[in-house]
Amino acid sequence: MEENKTISQEELEQLMHDAEQGDAEAQYNLAYCYEYGDGVVQDIDKAIYWYKKAAEQEFVPAQVSLGNIYYYGEGVEQDYKQAVEWYALAAEQGHVEAQCVLGFCYYDGEGVETNKKQAVYWWSKAAEQGHVDAQIVLGLWYYWGEDADQDYQKARQWFEKAADKGSADAQFFLGKLYEEGQGVAQDYWKASQLY
């Protein structure tokens, strides 16, 4: 494996020293170096070792990184159950991306039993913090009325929040609401502006 050289040898030595002394941020940064081969030979096992050291100290970025490694099977066998465990720890501490992904895990039954209420719970947590993908997913949830929760007003509210942040997908569905007069007064002109 190749190694990249964006970190100096002196910085790497200091990072290793601090990581060995129990500094969670240093452990996370060292894990990152091993995951991506930055200044060291890429080694996913060492990356996981150091991410776990940091994650066990409730260092949220390390928890998310471990979740990603196991969710996507990056250098290890894909393991949704372990991914969910790490994402849940980060989500409970307010990490917005972990909350959104955890929602998808509950929705799709990846690493946990399918639980639509938990999916909506975690998407709502992320959406309330401004996560655009979670806002769109909630908009779609209420638009399509999955599990008898159809509510065009709520769909509009979530689509508007995501559209205000520039989401073309949210603008499209907001346009559909105006075109069809669902949850809003029918307005073809406004719909055409959103498409």
Image (spheres, helix red, strand yellow):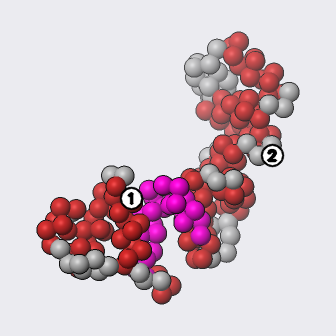
- The structure residue drawn at horizontal position 53% and vertical position 55%, both measured from the top left corner, is 129
For the stretch drawn in magenta, the main secondary structure is helix
Residue type of the residue flagged with mark 2:
Glu
Q: Is residue 130 left or right of residue 39?
A: left
Q: Is residue 115 left or right of residue 165?
A: right
- Which residues are the magenta region? 121-145
Determine whether 171 is above or below 90 in the image.
below
Q: Secondary structure at mark 1?
A: helix
Q: Residue at x 77, y 35 (%)?
A: 24
C-alpha span from label 2 to label 1: 34 Å
Q: Residue at x 54, y 66 (%)?
A: 124
Q: Residue furthest bottom?
A: 148
Provide the residue designation for mark 1: 162
121 or 186: nearer the viewer: 186
Quarter of the image where one finds residue 158:
bottom left
Q: Secondary structure at mark 2?
A: loop
Q: Residues within 10 Å of mark 2 (few under 14, many from 20)?
A: some
| Left or right: 170, with 42 as reference point | left
- Residue 54 visible? The answer is yes
**Eyeballing the image, is 158 above or below 71?**
below
Q: In the image as oriented, which residue stretches furthest toward the top?
A: 10
